Image (tube, rainbow, N blue to C red):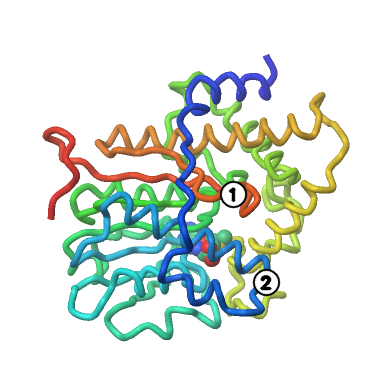
Amino acid sequence: MTVASRVQMIQSKHVEVNIENAPEMAIHNAVLEEFTTVGRTESSLRHLRQASSILHLVEAEGLVKEGTCYVELGAGKGQLSVFAAEAWCGEGDGSSVMLVERAALRHKRDNRLRAGAAHRLRADLAHLVLGRTPAVRDSRATVALAKHLCGVATDYALRCVVGAGDETRAAGLVMATCCHHRCELSAYVGELQELGISDEEFNIMLGVVSWATCGHGRSRRYRGETDVTDTSNDLNDSESDESSETEVNHEQRVTEEESKERKCSKPSAGLAVGGRAEVGRRAKAVVDWGRVMYLRRRGWRARLCHFVPRHVSLENVCIVATALHSDGGDQIKY
Ligand SMILES: C[S@@+](CC[C@H](N)C(=O)[O-])C[C@H]1O[C@@H](n2cnc3c(N)ncnc32)[C@H](O)[C@@H]1O
């Protein structure tokens, strides 16, 4: 059986019926002013739609409560956190946002938030012990947010939010995943072997995930090539020379891949273009499904959700999860 048909079989058995579509909602109030500002580019409107949808999902999960620390993981310049702070961190209710980002970026949006409402932490999620950060330690609960958290960083994030036990007092999370070709078997939280996928097949799957966007598979870094979109030396917005993808070159790459998708017209791997894209989407869904299983195993209620339609972003899947009491399934109380 080919990897493509194996991915198809696994996905249709385990995922197809399990990715829901978020209900269409009006643009969230916290986002509305920016959204209606004249002269916005199409790209920035698409980001605002995504932020709006993530805010709605957090609210629909009942995760907005006083004394909560909303932690944005891989926060980039902090646009989502700024909206979260505006929506949920009023003066006197004891809530705050914490932004975790490993790159040093200029023009951070959170700079304009009032002192005490926002904390930025420059850290690599691979090494973060969330429960030991003052903002989380001093809050009554933690809600994790992520928008386009690349590849392996989502696994690091899940480990530091969920794997830390009670230390973080984690109540829930809404994490939009992306760049699945940047996942790493050694850090992946899912247990795909249980679905009948070997380590080798998992790695092959990471090579087909980019078919979803008609990209070229594993990044050049993994193929031992120099990737011009993978350094930030040419980026005005980054002060660092991070080798990882930053917000800015991610945006550039996704835009490039989206335009490639429109241009791609030749069949390959024995599949028509639409078929390749579908296999890529299925592979991405399987990777995310393993993450849902990880959460469920730890007693969380978890699911996958298309948080925006594909015309807004091809990276449109998020994990929505709520921590449950070990005694019987009530939402965590605090
Ligand atoms: C695609 S960008 C998304 C930025 C922002 N969330 C947004 O949607 O505008 C992903 C961000 O995650 C950060 N990131 C990736 N891996 C990380 C890690 N291991 N630890 C901390 N930040 C990471 C990158 O530096 C980048 O800024």
Q: Earlier in the sequence, mark 1 or mark 2?
A: 2
Q: Nearer the viewer, residue 81 or 4?
A: 81
Q: Which residue is rendered at x = 45% and y = 33% of the image?
A: 290
Q: CA distance from mark 1 to mark 2?
A: 19 Å
- Circle 2 packing at 10 Å, graded few (<14), some (14-19), many (20+), is few
In percent of width and height, residue 74 lies at 47, 62
Label drawn at residue 41:
2
- The type of residue carrying mark 2 is Thr
The answer to whether 98 appears left or right of 102 in the picture is left
Q: Quadrant of the C terminus?
A: bottom left
Report the number of discs: 2
User: Is residue 299 positioned above or below 111 on the image?
Assistant: above
In percent of width and height, residue 15 lies at 49, 28
The answer to whether 159 appears left or right of 80 in the picture is left
The answer to whether 112 appears left or right of 134 in the picture is right
- The type of residue carrying mark 1 is Glu
Q: Nearer the viewer, residue 228 or 262?
A: 262
Q: Which residue is rendered at x = 46% and y = 45% of the image?
A: 22
User: Is residue 258 positioned above or below 101 on the image?
Assistant: above
| Residue that carries the numbered disc 1 in the rendered image | 315
In percent of width and height, residue 268 lies at 83, 31
Q: Quadrant of the N terminus?
A: top right
Name the mark nearer the viewer: 1 or 2.
Answer: 2
